[in-house]
Amino acid sequence: MSVEQWSETVMLGELSDDPQYTDDLRAIIEGCTSNPRTDVLLNFSAVNYLNSSNIAKLLKLRKLVTISNERRLKLCGISREVWGVFLVTGLDRIFEVADDVPTGLASLQIEQ
C-alpha cells in the first residue's frame, strides 16, 4: 500500500492507476474518518488516467476532508493527460494543486 502517515497531521498518498488507486483512496478515506484532524496530500505522478469512478472517489474524499473534517486536501504531480481531465471536468477549480510532493508537504506545514 502506498499510503503513509507522513506526520501527526499529514497523510501522504502515492496513487497509481486502478485497481491500486481505488484501494489507496479507500484506505485514505478510512484513515481520515478515524482521524479527522488529518490533512491529505495525494501524489498523482503515477496516475495515467482517471475514469468516472476514480473522480467520484476523489470528490468523496474532498467532501470528507475539506467539508466534514475542515482540513486540507492537496494534489500534486499531475500528469498532462490527467490534468486534461481536470480541466474538462472543472476539477482544477475545486482542488488545490502543488507541483510536487516536497512543495505540497511544505505548503501543508506552513499553512497550519
Image (cartoon, rainbow, N blue to C red):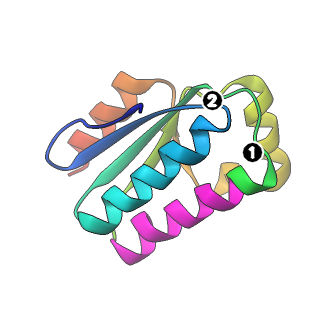
Q: Is the magenta stretch mostly helix, strand or loop?
A: helix
Q: Which residue lies furthest to the bottom in this view?
A: 68
Q: In this view, does 103 lie to the left or right of 74?
A: left
- Residue nearer the viewer, 110 or 2: 2
Tally of numbered discs: 2
Location of residue 65 by image quarter: bottom left
Q: Residue furthest right?
A: 88
Q: In which quarter of the image is the N terminus?
A: top left
Q: Is residue 110 left or right of residue 8?
A: right
Q: Callout 1 environment at 10 Å: few (<14), some (14 to 19), or many (20+)?
A: some
At label 1, which amino acid type do we have? Answer: Phe
Q: Which residue is drawn at 53% across and 40% down?
A: 97
Residue 84 appears at what percent x and percent y?
Answer: 81, 36
* Residue that numbered label 2 is attached to: 78
Q: Do the residues labelled 1 and 2 touch (CB within 8 Å)?
A: yes
Q: In this view, does 45 lie to the left or right of 24?
A: right
Give the SS element for disc 2: loop
- Residue nearer the viewer, 24 or 112: 24
At label 2, which amino acid type do we have? Answer: Ile
First in sequence, mark 1 or 2: give its number: 2
Q: Is residue 57 magenta?
A: yes
From where the camera sits, is residue 71 visible? Answer: no
Q: What stretch is highlighted in magenta?
A: 55-69
Q: Is residue 91 left or right of residue 23?
A: right
Residue 2 appears at what percent x and percent y?
Answer: 41, 31
In the picture, the disc for residue 86 is 1
Residue 92 appears at what percent x and percent y?
Answer: 68, 48
Per the model, the C-alpha gap separating discs 1 and 2 is 9 Å
From where the camera sits, is residue 78 visible? Answer: yes
Residue 55 appears at what percent x and percent y?
Answer: 70, 54
Q: Which residue is drawn at 31% across and 52% down?
A: 39
Give the SS element for disc 1: helix
